[in-house]
Every structure is written in C-alpha cells, then in structure tokens.
Amino acid sequence: QVQVVESGGGVVQPGRSLRLSCAASGFTFNDYGMHWVRQAPGKGLEWVAIIWSDGTNAYYADSVRGRFTISRDNSKNIVYLQMNSLTAEDTAVYYCARDWKWNLDYWGQGTLVTVSS
Amino acid sequence: EIVLTQSPATLSLSPGERATLSCRASQSVSTYLAWFQQKPGQPPRLLIYEASNRATGIPARFSGSGSGTDFSLTISSLEPEDFAVYYCQQRSNWPRTFGQGTKVEIK
C-alpha cells in the first residue's frame, strides 16, 4: 500500500536550518511528483512546494521561495525539504503528499517543526 | 495568487442532515478544484478532484459541483464520521492555494 513517512522535525532556533525527509513506499516513486504542505498550530493548510517526478523542476510558495529547497533522491525513494533562515512563522506540521494528476492523493502523518529560542 | 474563500466558517448540523459547503475563487480555476477532509490529529484526505470526481474509496454521499469561480461540496446525509474540517484547493495556477476551511460540527 502507498505510504509516505515524514521525519526530521524538531525544535530549532530562529535563523537556523533544518532538513525534513519523506520516505515513500508502495508505488513507483520516480513516476510521481511530490509536495510539501504545512499547517501552523490551529490554522489551515498552506501549500509549500512541489518537485517534478524526475527532479528537473520545482515550484514554491512565495512565503518560502529563496529560503526552502525541495529535492529528491529517486534511488532512495526520498524527498527532502531543506529549510533555511527559519522564523517563528515557519512553525507548523509539515506534510509530504504524493502528486497524482496534479492532485495530492496520499499524505503522510506529518512532522512538527517548532522555531523558538 | 488565487484566493479561495470558503463559507460558512462553521456549519452546525445533526447526523442525517444535508451539508452544503461553498468555495469561491478570486479568478477562474476551470474545474481544477479539489476538496479535502481533515479530522483532528490526522492528515487531510482527498475527497473530490477536478470539482466533481470522487477519489478512490470515497462514499457516494459526497459530491462536488461547480466550475469557474463557484464550487460546492455536498454531503447528502451526514454520518457521525463526517464531522470534520473541509478544505478546497485549486490546481489551476502556481502557487497552489487552499481555502481557509469549513468546520462541520454536531448541532
């Protein structure tokens, strides 16, 4: 069955960096684009980024462009989110989701990132 | 970016009642709109894609309609497990955007 499992969250100081990972299984990973979506505590969903199935292209939300980088390793079935210059506004649960015909069809359980001094 | 406005913010209904949720886009998204359900402590679940297509395993009581800028999600008869928050999301333009959500609560 399709599974995506996020990891790498934790508490980080403002201005520091963190890298999230998303391990996928149960499908042909290099056939699918992958998204990151976040949700601040008690708030709604915010789309963060997408990477194409072959890793050749990516798009970002305005709020993270220039600070976050999405990448993938198709040999390991993992997608990453490198987050730099973190601020308190980046505190959220970060979800990884599979792209199916430009829809987000399978989601992981998420990993919590807390930016605090 | 395309702004999606959902209404109402909260819908108070009883099991067995019909629920109608609205999502309005700031510009046309054609039929490139999806609906998600989220329960506390869980990730979102895809319910409807391309405005009116049910995702795999979604019960027939969920239906979506609309095109252009006005969309709706209807739950024909609420089951206890349907009380949750619902989000719409557009895939017409980058960046992808979500509505702010509608909470369907037990009256």
Image (cartoon, rainbow, N blue to C red):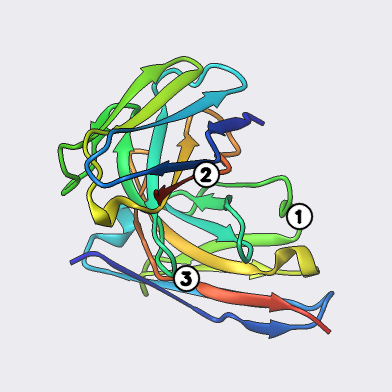
- Secondary element under disc 3, as helix, strand or loop, is loop
Would you name the residue on which mark 1 appears? A66
Q: CA distance from mark 3 to mark 1?
A: 23 Å
Q: CA distance from mark 2 to mark 1?
A: 28 Å
Where is residue B11 shown, x and y percent of the image? 45, 40
Where is residue A104 shown, x and y percent of the image? 38, 48
In which chain is the residue bearing label 1?
A
- Say which amino acid is labelled 2: Gly
Between B21 and A89, the one nearer to me in the picture: B21
**Image quadrant occupied by the N terminus of chain B:** top right
Where is residue A91 shown, x and y percent of the image? 69, 69
- Say which amino acid is labelled 3: Gly
> At 19% from the left edge and 45% from the top edge, which residue is drawn?
B58
In which chain is the residue bearing label 3?
A
- Say which amino acid is labelled 1: Gly
When the figure is inspected, residue A28 is found, relative to residue B75, above or below; the finding is: below
Q: In which quadrant of the rendered view does residue A109 lie?
A: bottom left
In this rendering, the label closer to the viewer, 2 or 3: 2
In this rendering, the label closer to the viewer, 2 or 1: 2
The answer to whether B76 appears left or right of A10 in the picture is: left
Between A91 and A28, the one nearer to me in the picture: A91
